[in-house]
Amino acid sequence: MRTYLFDLDGTLLDSIDLILTSFHHTSRIHLGRELTDEYWLAGVGTPLRTALSKVAGSDEETDAMLATYRDFNLEHHDAMAKAYPGVADVVRRLHRDGAKLALVTSKLSIGANRGLRLLELEEEFPVRICADDVVNGKPHPEPVLKALAALEAPASSAVFIGDSEHDMAAGRAAGVDTVAVTWGPFPRATLEAQAPTHWIDTPEQLLGL
């Protein structure tokens, strides 16, 4: 039985509008200006601290921006985020069939757990590797390798399903097959640079890999 490692935002959870709105809110509060959607999207899939530290003037400002972002994001989470059609059903089927599943996300655990509750997939993902569980976030392979270790699964049995180039890079560096989903926010050309092992246009196609 294969091991399935899933990214969260842009893969399981349609939360991109929420993420961008949270970034813009934080930027207005702390920087007095807004950056473009394209700028913030480029950092989606990497740890939030990494993305914010690039525009903050100090570690203290990064901490303050993190707090502002998290408070706004969690306040608006359930109203703005939703499941991608068909994704939860496929995850539940894999779980029923006995597959090993893990969540591998650059979100902090408080946000990741909130997302799984909204998706009603908490039971399906007892193993969750979040930003606060690792030293090096994606695109570093550490999160993927830590998930494999927790599942006691070899890389040869695993696929990492994600929507960003950072997911593809992390999976490839960890020695697992990668699956690029096309329903996320990134154009195919961006992901092609990381040479995904598989492409899927619908969640159901994952069952045939």
Image (cartoon, rainbow, N blue to C red):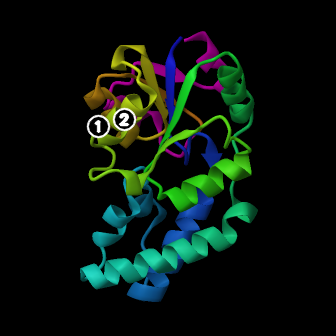
Q: CA distance from mark 2 to mark 1?
A: 5 Å
Image position of 124 with respect to 107: above or below: above
Tell me the crowding category of disc 2: few under 14, some 14 to 19, or many 20 or more residues within 10 angstroms, Cα based: many
Residue drawn at x 40%, y 18% is: 197
Q: Is residue 140 left or right of residue 191?
A: left
For label 2, the SS is helix
Q: On the rendered structure, is 192 left or right of 3?
A: left
Tell me what residue is drawn at x 42 percent, y 14 percent: 157
From this viewpoint, is residue 131 visible?
yes
Residue 31 position (above or below residue 10): below
Which circle marks residue 144 in the picture? 2
Range of magenta residues: 184-209
Q: Residues within 10 Å of mark 1 (few under 14, many from 20)?
A: many
**Residue 186 is one of the magenta-drawn residues:** yes
Image marks 2 and 1: residues in contact by CB distance under 8 Å: yes
Q: Amino acid at mark 1?
A: Pro
Percent coordinates x, y for residue 26 in the rendering: 48, 79
Per the image, the residue denoted by label 1 is 141
For residue 117, above or below residue 28: above
Instruction: Give coordinates of residue 178: x percent, y percent.
Output: 41, 25
Image quadrant where residue 74 sits: bottom right
